[in-house]
Amino acid sequence: MTIKVKLNLGIGLLFILITLLTVISNFYINKLSGDTKEILVANYNTLDYSREMLISLNEGSISDADMKHFQDNLNKQQHNVTEIGEQELTDKLTADFAQLKRNRNDSAIIKKIRTDITDIIWVNMQAIQRKNAIAQSTVDDASIWIIITGTFCFLIALTLLFNLPSNIANPIQELTHSFKEVAAQNYSQRVHFHKHNEFGELASTFNTMAEKLGEYKNSNLEKITIEKKRIETLINNLKDPVIGLDENRRILFMNDVAIKVAGLKSKDEVIGQLVQDIAVKNDLVRSLIQDLFTSEATLTDNKMLIKIYADNRESYFEKEIIPIKITPTGEKEEKLIGNVILLQNITPYKELDFAKTNFIATVSHELKTPISSIQMSLQLLENKRVGVINSEQKKLIESIKEDTGRLLKITSELLNMTQVESGNIELSITPVNPKDILDFAVHTTKMLAEQKQIKFNINCDDNLPQILVDKEKTSWVLINLISNAIRYSYDNSIIFLNITKDKNVVKISVKDTGQGISSQYISKIFNRYFRVPGTKKEGTGLGLAISKEFIEAQDGQISVESELGAGTIFTLTLKTFA
């Protein structure tokens, strides 16, 4: 509990009790005043009226003035009846006084009237005693409640008197002592307040300050200088270009390889300069720092491949921007203190990749010729004019046909992949009717569908616009998607083929009712050589990767939607011919 809350609670409770004491005192004073007023107003007046009436009868002979004086006080008494039995006595007095009016000298009547007045006086005297007892009880109750409330106020005030000064003064004394120790360069001094209040936060801040001062004291300028030289030497001996920036994007270091690759003269002209000032005059530096000026939310950690002319040849580098973040001593949140731009030279690996691509292209191209010859020979063997073959030989021929078809498909995919990897995808973009491409793909895969008794459900919008595509490659992609749909669909099922127009694009979708793809593999199916684990269908894992490259090379898009157990939908989005 914080000190502020403690003060608010203590003083607030004391204030409430004092207010309660005031209310109780006022209540009982008002009540006592009412009881006293009731005695004075009602009973005292009756006694006064009775006294005046007795005086009127004490004169020797009763005159008309005495009778009038008696009548006036009797009338007042009739309007001042407040006690039990007083009304009957007042009525009797009135009746007796009426007889006195008829015979003023009748002593018996005068005696009766005196008795009536005495009875009225006695009733009111008893009432005064009773009301006095009530008033005394009110005084006693008031005293008890005032004593109880005052005791509570006293106890709370006593508690605050003994506890509050020590709760505030003791931590201040301890902090004062600790500050004196730190002032005397005793940076190991710590304050340990475990309470969660203002002093606890102040102690935590003080300990952080002392720890940082201790770090600064223990640091050695010579040691720091040696470490700085060691790091600079290490960076300069790296074979890859490295550029270091501070949080304000000033260049802290730039090794010799980076200076050479960037075409700069020396370090002196760049160290301490804003990197954007260097980028204004240097195209390479400008391309390297582009990602630094995007927001942190859009800055990705993906490495980027860039091509640089270095060492009198084209070299390939993989750029990576590494943000440098630290958690300062005593703090909890990370702070960005700079960035390191690292260029990894991957030219040897890229050359090996080119060699691999050329090798695959050469081998695939060379394999196509003997495979085609094998297919030709198989066609001749199936011709009855060459000779009749038995059933076993026919099965062998069918098996060889399947193997050669599979080999031919693999070599075709490898040749397409070499185009993709080398970046030499040759496109012949022309306006084409999308329905023609779909019809061609359906005709090509019709026999494969009939083997599994699969039917096509084709739906096309009316008045479809032409699309700008490479007809051959787009047809290849669509045939590949339909073939996959047939392969992964169950027998006697239906494949849905739709062509729709949407603003400036045409969408061609292929939907099967097969087993679908698990959500964890959706993002990977366009990767090269990837195959969904557990599938028993044959394939190289290149078809979808090639399809994606072919479609995107035509400024189109290919997307997939799938749910395990509910089939898959592949959609091609292609630009229309304006």
Image: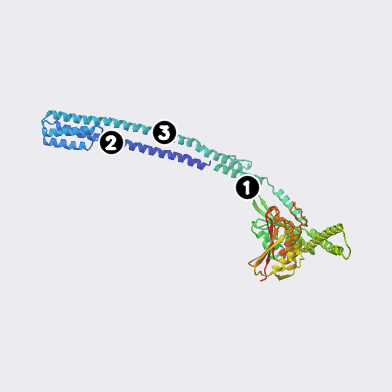
Check disc 1 and report the residue beneath it. 332
How many numbered circles does the render carry? 3
Residue 284 in the image: x percent, y percent? 72, 63
Image colouring: rainbow
- Helix, strand, or loop for circle 1? loop
Give the CA distance from mark 3 to mark 1.
52 Å
In the image, taking residue 317 as reference, residue 111 lies left or right, namely left
The quadrant in which residue 50 appears is: top left
In-front residue for pair 292/469:
469
Check disc 3 and report the residue beneath it. 148
Give the CA distance from mark 2 to mark 3.
29 Å
Is disc 2 surrounded by few (<14), some (14 to 19) or many (20+) residues within 10 Å? some
Give me the residue at 73% from left, 68% from top. 471
Q: In the displayed image of the protein, which residue is found farthest to the right?
A: 387
Q: Nearest to the eye among marks 2 and 3: give it.
A: 2
Residue 75 in the image: x percent, y percent? 19, 37
Q: Nearest to the eye among marks 2 and 1: give it.
A: 2
Residue 38: numbered disc: 2
Residue 507 in the image: x percent, y percent? 67, 64
- Label 2 is placed on what type of residue? Glu
Earlier sequence position, callout 2 versus callout 3 = 2
- Helix, strand, or loop for circle 3? helix
Residue 59 in the image: x percent, y percent? 13, 31
In the image, taking residue 459 as reference, residue 344 lies left or right, namely right
- Helix, strand, or loop for circle 2? helix
Give the CA distance from mark 2 to mark 1.
75 Å
Which quarter shows the C terminus? bottom right
Is disc 1 surrounded by few (<14), some (14 to 19) or many (20+) residues within 10 Å? few
